[in-house]
Amino acid sequence: DGKLVRTLTGHQALVTDLEFSPDRKILASSSCAVELLPDQGCPQGEIRFWDLSSGQLISIWGKGHSGLVVDIAFPPDGQFLAAVDRWGRAMLWRVADATSVWELWGCSRPVVFSPDGQFLALGSVDGIAIRRVAYGEATIVLEDHGSSAVFSSDGRILIVASSDYIRFWDIATGKLLRTLTWHTGPVFGLGISPDGKRLVSGSDDRTIKLWRVEDGSLIGSLLGYTGRVTSVAFSPDDTFVISAGEDGVAAWNVDQLR
């Protein structure tokens, strides 16, 4: 019914990202550890963990991040949390004891785990590196600098949004497989359906588009926004697309668009 259930308070600066743990018991949120003043940089980032059943703050992390944390992600098993800050430091944290497993410099968005949790797609100055989660070493670097990405359901393809296009990359060979060019403005958000068959994209062109992952064909466009669409996701039951943008948050029934 659209009723506000709970408001979580405590962050002193802009909240840059939100991620649910795979078991849906914890919400992680990223920000700066102190209130930001005009023309002042963030001296230390922070990640907060919230109990979703009670809304209570569980813990605050951030030691090691000397700047605003801009992107975070859980792997499917929820054992780790990957984070990257504005100064380019990426860290893999062990959730059980809040210890750092490894850290790298020169990194950026996106931060995306593969479906099996063995690989992490992480932006860098050279492109998007596909890294082994265990040690952080890169297996291949894709020649793309998009800030939003999702893996295909089988983990073989990384789908990247940038500028006004969407690209499909083979992560084993680094080969560009497909480019989707129907958007007329920068693409800010991507989401893949629970069954792995549909892709949703949100853009600066004020549209949301649905695609078939198998062949890249356009299923249709969702119209109604008067401003940019910045984030999109499928509902767990695969029947709705949830979008966020300059006009607010909206839910779209896409059950018949396949």
Image: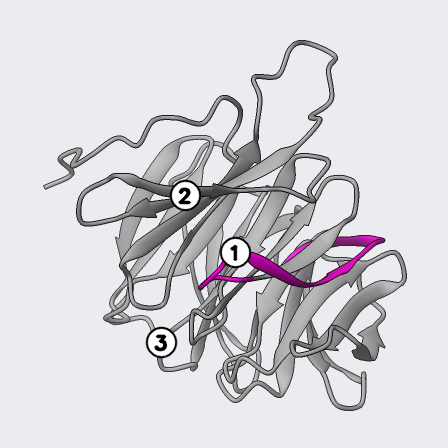
Q: Residue furthest left?
A: 1
| Front-lying residue, 129 or 240 | 129
Q: Quadrant of the C terminus?
A: bottom left
Report the mark closest to the observer, 1 or 3.
1
| Alpha carbon distance from label 1 to label 3 | 29 Å
Residue at 52 percent of width and 56 percent of height: 98
N-terminal label among 2 and 3 = 2
In percent of width and height, residue 57 lies at 32, 39
Residue that numbered label 2 is attached to = 59
Quarter of the image where one finds residue 120: bottom right
Overall secondary structure of the magenta section = strand
Report the mark closest to the observer, 2 or 3.
2
What label sits on residue 194 in the rendered view? 3
Q: Which residue range is magenta in the image?
A: 94-110
Q: Image height check: is 102 above or below 88? A: below
What label sits on residue 98 in the rendered view? 1
Assess whether mark 3 and mark 2 are in contact (beta carbons under 8 angstroms).
Answer: no
Q: Is residue 162 left or right of residue 45?
A: right
What label sits on residue 252 in the rendered view? none
Q: Image height check: is 32 above or below 212? A: above
Type of amino acid under label 1: Ala
Residue at 18 percent of width and 43 percent of height: 54
Assess whether mark 1 and mark 2 are in contact (beta carbons under 8 angstroms).
Answer: yes
